[in-house]
Image (tube, rainbow, N blue to C red):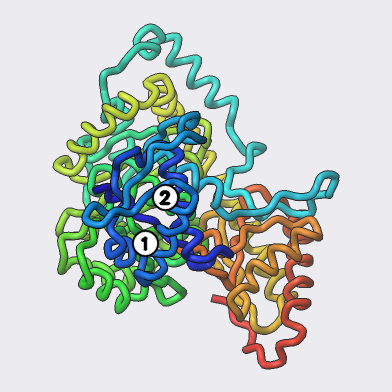
Amino acid sequence: MNRLLPDLDRTAAGTLVAQITAFYREAIELGRLRAGERLPTIRAVAAAAGVTRTTVQEAYRQLGEHGFVAGTVGRGTEVLDRAGPRDHAPPVSAYAAAALRQTAAMPGALPLQPGQALVANFAELSPDGELFPVAELRSAIDRVLQRRGGELLGYAHAATGLPELRAQLAQRRCAVDPPAAADDILITSGGQQALDLVLRTFCTPGDAVVVTSPSYHQLHGLLKALGLRAIAVPVGDQGLDLTALAQALAAGPVRLLYLMPTFHNPTGRTLDLRQRQALLQVVGRTRVPILEDEYQQPLRFRGDTLPSLRGLDRRGLTVTAHTFSKVLFPGLRLGWVQAGPSLLRPMAAVKRFMDLEASPLLQAALVEFIDRGALDRYLKKLRAELHKRHALLQKLLRAQLPAGCTVTDPDGGFLCWLELPAAGQGEALAELALARGVRVVPGRAFDPQGRPSRGVRLSLSRSNRAQIEAGAAVLAACAHRLLQADSSAPSRSFV
């Protein structure tokens, strides 16, 4: 019997019956369910999807009515051998089919209409190319090519990365963390591969992964493509809901906990030291590993650097993922994972069969770039610029937003989170702002279940002073319009 089970979206417009019917019809047409194979039992589907058996029975009946399956007493529901789209469609894997569905369904910032003028782009989380130190990187590449071109254009035979880059990154460790060694570093092809690598190393299809709500939207698709279940735990200005986390950990087997403790995407919030310690007290009673995503950690422009969860985890079960995509150039496609050697060894084995190794040329150029002080000079400039942009946005929103709105005030990074009083107003604000040329990402994109949100994400990565001033005015005007009828809105709050 095939164990392919549907993942239902209760916020979608279609009925649950229609979703189950479409799920198995697609599986048959794509060849993931073949003639003679049996569908999961009605009892199994109902339990996994959280629906009644009657709902599943109706879906199976509709599949039979259209000639996809037939039910036989004692044999269950079998896929029929039929001509049709299945014979012409590529027999793709469950991974590819899930990735395709999630890509098509992923909500995000809507594009401007053709010919519509852009007033402010608060949607893209992509560094500002006008600030890139292109000349210094070109010089670094030229220098390593002159010295080691023949070597670096071949295979380095180092799935873990060039030793010199790993040692360099270990030396640049957070000053409040324990000492690190080169053996604690594994170089990846960008931060997204780092996340994929950790998930593939720790998890098996069907496993549960705890995530925050809201959380990084690209992870949602990755989890579904890998056949993993997301368990959402709320996160807010008081940190992670530790009661909900403890309940999730106690309710059943959990294979991994995914967190962004510093400059969280999408809210920009940071867990303070007390919150980090309290979190580790809860998780420390288990053997559940933590995947700590520190994609913006070097972009702090205010306050003291905090110890990583990895540094605080006495169990040695926290893996920290870093990337150069946000703190330098996305086009480098370089990141790294930091953990103990016993955790990195299986990851290196998995990575070897994914891409053999990250580019030796770019790794060596990065070593040269860092040795020359170019990275530190760039980060100093970028942090100063981000501080100015955040300060301007905070000043404008404090003055212009209506009562009942909140906005986070991060100590670093590109992001902040604007929230309205009621669920669904985030999406309404995004639509109103778009009509006036301001792009934001509605909060629904960051909810693991795609539920209506109160908030929108604002990214300052590509916003100059003029865009921030114009964009803040539009957002405030749209928020006033949405809240005009709400005379009971609470007082203004900035957290």
- Gap in angstroms between the C-alphas marked 1 and 2: 28 Å
- Furthest residue to the top? 150
Residue at numbered disc 1 = 211
Compared with 98, 85 (above or below) is above
Compared with 149, 73 (above or below) is below
Which residue does the image show at 23% across and 61% down from the upper left? 254
Name the secondary structure under disc 1. strand
Side of 332 where 186 appears, left or right: left
Residue 488 visible? The answer is yes
Which numbered disc, 1 or 2, marks the residue that appears first in the sequence? 2
Q: Indicate the position of residue 291 as horizontal and vertical percent values.
A: 30, 53
Residue at numbered disc 2 = 24
Which residue does the image show at 28% across and 32% down from the upper left? 351
- Furthest residue to the front? 73
Given residues 245 and 59, the one toward you in this image is 59
| Label 1 neighbour load within 10 Å: few <14, some 14-19, many 20+ | many
